[in-house]
Amino acid sequence: EAQVTQNPRYLITVTGKKLTVTCSQNMNHEYMSWYRQDPGLGLRQIYYSMNVEVTDKGDVPEGYKVSRKEKRNFPLILESPSPNQTSLYFCASISLAGGLLTGELFFGEGSRLTVL
Amino acid sequence: KNQVEQSPQSLIILEGKNCTLQCNYTVSPFSNLRWYKQDTGRGPVSLTIMTFSENTKSNGRYTATLDADTKQSSLHITASQLSDSASYICVVRGGGTSYGKLTFGQGTILTVHP
């Protein structure tokens, strides 16, 4: 079954304690990205990756890091989480067939993060 | 700044009625526009995609339109069902040097009452 898997689904942590949210897709997609969703603001792109070792900033990259060492994995790293990073996070992937991003974006189930 | 504005913010309709959701965008250059449905607590799922040359596309009870000249899209839902209650998100993909970036609308929260 084609899917994007995020872990953990729920996490409560404290300010300054480094954490990583993992994302893995089994569809051999080149493009992967991370979003955060906050009430009244909708989904905002944090980082995206067009392929292995290729990453770029989205609209709200501050406070986050990503890496793309393998095609299937795209972890989101919060080096020193702060309360304003409390949010619902989604990972997504899409095929770059023919070099065109016309396919459907497949989303994970979301990771709800609370930073105290 | 590239933006995507959706209206209304929220909508309540009775089961069986039709409704239309709007999406206006300023993203340029434009590549394509997708409508997604997001159930509460779940990830968004694609309903339909509109490219520059397409005006209308249907997917069951969902019909999307695109006017690339005025930079407007709409999603029309026919004969609504209780399961249509969700957030509907318009997502625009830019072209050129912004090819990898997506701009999301804030979403329209649709509630269908029996």
Image (cartoon, rainbow, N blue to C red):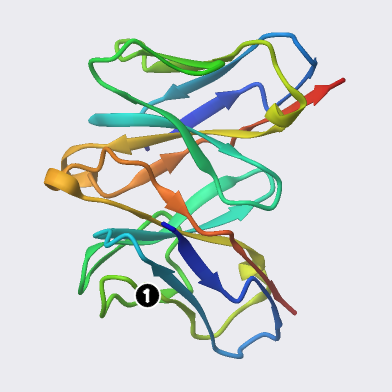
Residue A8, given in percent of the width and then of the height, sits at: 60, 76
Front residue of this view, candidates B81 and B66: B81
Residue at screen point 71% across, 46% down:
B40
Residue at screen point 52% across, 18% down:
B60
> In the drawing, does residue B41 fall left or right of residue B113?
left
Residue at screen point 75% across, 11% down:
B16
Where is A91 relative to B99, above or below?
A: below
Where is B14 relative to A26, above or below?
A: above
Looking at the image, the residue that sits furthest to the left is A98
> In the drawing, does residue A50 fall left or right of residue A74?
left
Front residue of this view, candidates A104 and B95: A104
- Residue assigned mark 1: A66
Number of residue marks: 1
Q: Which quadrant of the structure image shows residue B34? A: top left
Residue A115, given in percent of the width and then of the height, sits at: 69, 77
Q: Chain of mark 1?
A: A
Where is B69 relative to B100, above or below?
A: above
Residue A81, given in percent of the width and then of the height, sits at: 59, 80
Q: Quadrant of the C terminus of chain A?
A: bottom right
- Under circle 1, the secondary element is strand
Give the amino acid type for the residue marked by disc 1 in the picture.
Answer: Val
Looking at the image, the residue that sits furthest to the bottom is A17
Q: Is residue A68 visible?
A: yes
Structural crowding at the residue carrying mark 1, measured as other residues with C-alpha within 10 Å and reported as few (<14), some (14–19) or many (≥20): many
Q: Which quadrant of the structure image shows residue A41? A: top right
Q: Quadrant of the N terminus of chain A?
A: bottom left
Residue at screen point 26% across, 71% down:
A71
Q: Is residue B28 visible?
A: no
